[in-house]
Amino acid sequence: MRIPSAGIRYVLNAIDNAILIVRKETGEISFANPSSGILLGIPFESIRGRPLAEVLPFTQRDRNGKGDGNRGRENSFFQMTLTDGTTISVTMKTIPYSWEGQEYEFVVLTDMTDQLEQERQSLLTNENLKRWVIEAEQRYGALAVLQELTILLQRCRNLEEVAKVVSSFMTKILPKSMGDLVLMDAEKKGARTVSAWGRISADPMLLDVERCAGLHTGKTAVIRSDDSDAPICVRHIAARFHMSFCIPLKIDEETIGVLHVHFDQTHLQSQETSEDNSLDHERKLGESAANLLSLSIANAMLRETLLHQAIRDPLTGLFNRRYLEESMAREVARATRTKNPLSVIMTDIDHFKVFNDQFGHAAGDEVLRVVSDCLINSVRGSDIVCRFGGEEFLIVLQDAGLVDAANRAEQIRKSVSSIPLDFQGKNLGYVTMSFGVSEFPIHGEVPERFIKEADMALYRAKKEGRNRVVTASVADPPNV
Ligand code: GH3
Ligand code: MG
Ligand code: MG
């Protein structure tokens, strides 16, 4: 009697699963259907009579690691490499079966390769979808926050305001980051911190351009503490950050500064989205912010240059007369409101014509610069020093009465007359200055009047022998 009977054989031969019937006693295959030949990649007729162990070339154990290959358990999962080298994934179901006093096993093999691949693909698609959603959310969030930054920066009228936006807003763009904004000096030899956020202090530290990769190369430098080949940035080294970006700020290919963005270990550990912790998203955001900052810094610088040109004297850098006229009204209003005193000093270089004639105009210009510096350094930051005419200057002293102003004038007189002057290696000797001082409102209630009084006092100082300070007389104020 053949195993199985003709009827069952007919059915088994027709179905798609690979079916083998194994005689338990010998381990030999008594029956193999055509599908088993297809699955195993061999003629099914050659299977019969061979041991199961030889026919099933299992290469990997089942998913649970318990499968013993040829014996199998009920419902095992295997991978096997066929004679042509391809690897397929197979589930094996073993069903015990008795026939005329003999024990057999029905072995049902199902090729799972395609199904598993489909599952894998759909898992991958799910993973991708999840990542895309996170990335889209990130991108949308980043876009919104960059738009907010754009609006804030558009409102900035000067560099200080840009610096304030950086210190208050960068943590919103890059949470858990810290860093600073460093701008190049006018001479481009050094750079200075102008703003900071996170745990970084905004001390106006000087940074050597050569020692910051971003500044030096003009390209974003990514610095990881665990990478010995990473570019150098002293800011990164100094504070031992885990990862830093030095993102250059550029205007027309010219590097004007750098945005340092640092992360410590805790931030990297909390990163769920970037598998390799390279913080690419953060780097790109930092670069976008740096681009926006470059633009607004360029704008602020242009605005400051134009303003400077409009209100400053180009030779000395002092305020010009136009600025003085504009600010005098403000100063008078303030002094009236606060009831604080307000004085002016009018001063003029003595015999400057002779000086020019003797040493030349260029030497004279240099002396004007030196004298201007001395004036600026002799008064408070809130005082206004103005080039009133050729070699004539007006100083507006806030909160100083006539006596204080006269004392200050005397100090300046001494300082100027003790500066040894030289030009292109040539000793020019010394210059002296004469001073006239007046006070608001004693010497006039409008700027024109008390300035005129100071000018008249100066005239008297000249007449009385120069190199001296004369205060305006209270009696007999001038008519303007
Ligand atoms: P005093 O003591 O009476 O003020 O005599 P002074 O020679 O200084 O006065 P004066 O008004 O006769 O001459 C002013 C000179 O200042 C004339 C001009 O050559 C010089 N001066 C004015 N502006 C400039 C400038 O921008 N550069 C130079 N080098 N000289 C200037
Ligand atoms: Mg003069
Ligand atoms: Mg003069």
Image: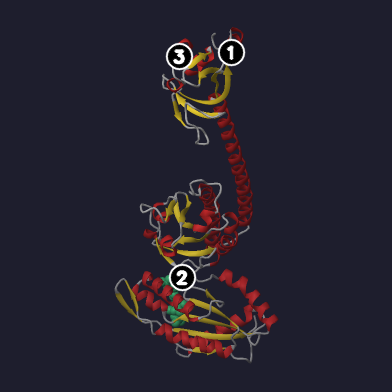
Q: Quadrant of residue 99?
A: top right
Q: Does label 2 or label 1 sit earlier along the sequence?
A: 1
Q: Secondary structure at mark 2?
A: loop
Q: Is the residue marked 2 within 8 Å of ligand 1, measured from its CB?
A: no
Is disc 3 in contact with disc 2, using a CB cutoff of under 8 Å? no
Q: Nearer the viewer, mark 3 or mark 2?
A: 3
Q: CA distance from mark 2 to mark 1?
A: 106 Å
Indicate the position of residue 239 as horizontal and vertical percent values: 44, 64
Q: Does label 1 or label 3 sit earlier along the sequence?
A: 1
Name the residue beneath numbered marker 1: 12
Q: Is residue 84 left or right of residue 472?
A: left
Q: Is residue 243 left or right of residue 168?
A: left
Seen in the picture, residue 342 relative to 94 is either above or below; the reply is below
Tell me which amino acid carries mark 3.
Answer: Gly
Name the residue beneath numbered marker 3: 49
Q: Quadrant of the N terminus?
A: top right
Q: Which mark is residue 159?
A: none
Q: Secondary structure at mark 3?
A: loop
**For ligand 2, which image quadrant applies?**
bottom left
User: In the image as oriented, which residue stretches furthest toward the front?
Assistant: 101
In the foreground, 158 or 346: 158
Q: Secondary structure at mark 1?
A: helix
Name the residue beneath numbered marker 2: 316
Q: Nearer the viewer, mark 2 or mark 1?
A: 1
* Residue at the image position 52 percent from the left and 89 percent from the top: 407
Q: Would you call the spot at circle 3 few (<14 residues within 10 Å), some (14-19), or many (20 or more)?
A: some
